[in-house]
Amino acid sequence: MLRRSFLAVALAFAGAGCAAVQAHVPPAGRLAGPLADIEVIDRNTGARLPIYHHQGRRYVVGTPGTRYAVAVRNRGSARVLAVVAVDGINAVSGESAAWHQTGYVLGGHQRYEVRGWRKSQERIAAFEFTALANSYAARTGRPDDVGVIGVALFREAVPQPAVPIAPAVPPAETSELRREAPASAPPARADSGLGAARALGSESAADRAQSKAEQRLGTGHGRSETSQVTYTGFERAGAAPDQVIAIHYDSHANLVALGVIPPSVSRPPLPNPFPGSVGFVADPPR
């Protein structure tokens, strides 16, 4: 495997424990996996968006104009690489997303919020929910996979003992994002990540075939913000990810129409033309 240069996150936040997710009762705000926990954060309020399970998929409700972040917390002590895609686009490079591309390297137990499309090592354009036509994907001619957030996670390769051989020409480097304090990691399990990623592709195809109650949401190219990162080297333990998480999003009305969210029990009942028992008209109170 080639050792590549990835972007390392410069800010870390303390992570909390993980919680199980069940459909409707109640929706959780965190997805727990073997390598990392994933959250979608409403940056207007700081709250985690509830995650709903429906027919094998995960959903969050988006509100037009709301800035959001994809929070990734490394659950282990070894470094991991997170390749983050929004609407089928790599959040760092802007390429149509693929596993082999650049991403963020997180140190042991580190939590990082991916808050936007990376413009440089110092700046991002904020993620914000918007109408599909105004999404970054649609504006760049790639609207087919709008409405899904993906995170592919890779373990780091275990260093091999040095062998005294003639020096080789160093391989060319590409860019990806990292965190300090390198550590060794257990062997990769490419099988589980491969299956999950295949499911991700089939889910996006199903989304395109579904009829929605109102216009779908996408993620816009929002305001410019400061977000510092640096570069680091990282060698993946395998070509396929060890964990892939997909979270779909849309408006509340569309998710109710799809049956993802049950209609609100607090909604006032519709007027009943015959609410009372059989009888005659009584006198009004004096």
Image (spheres, helix red, strand yellow):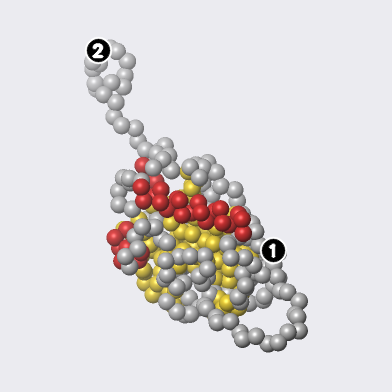
**Horizontal relation, residue 52 to residue 15: left or right:** left
Q: Which mark is residue 278?
A: none
Q: Residue 160's quadrant in the figure?
A: bottom right
Q: Which mark is residue 280?
A: 2
* Point 42% across, 70% down: residue: 95
Above or below: residue 141 compared with residue 28: below
Q: Residue furthest top?
A: 279
Single out the mark in the foreground, 2 or 1.
Answer: 1
* Point 41% across, 61% down: residue: 87
42 and 257: which is toward the camera: 257
Image position, residue 45 (x, y; %)? 45, 60
SS at mark 1?
loop
Look at the image and tell me whether residue 44 can be seen: no
Above or below: residue 244 compared with residue 268: below
* Point 38% across, 62% down: residue: 219
Question: Crowding at label 1, few (<14), some or many (≥20) Cα neighbours within 10 Å?
Answer: few
Q: Amino acid at mark 2?
A: Phe
Look at the image and tell me whether residue 3 can be seen: yes
Quarter of the image for the N terminus: give it. Answer: bottom right
Image position, residue 16 (x, y; %)? 62, 59
SS at mark 2?
loop
Q: Amino acid at mark 1?
A: Pro
In the rendered image, which residue does mark 1 sit on?
A: 187
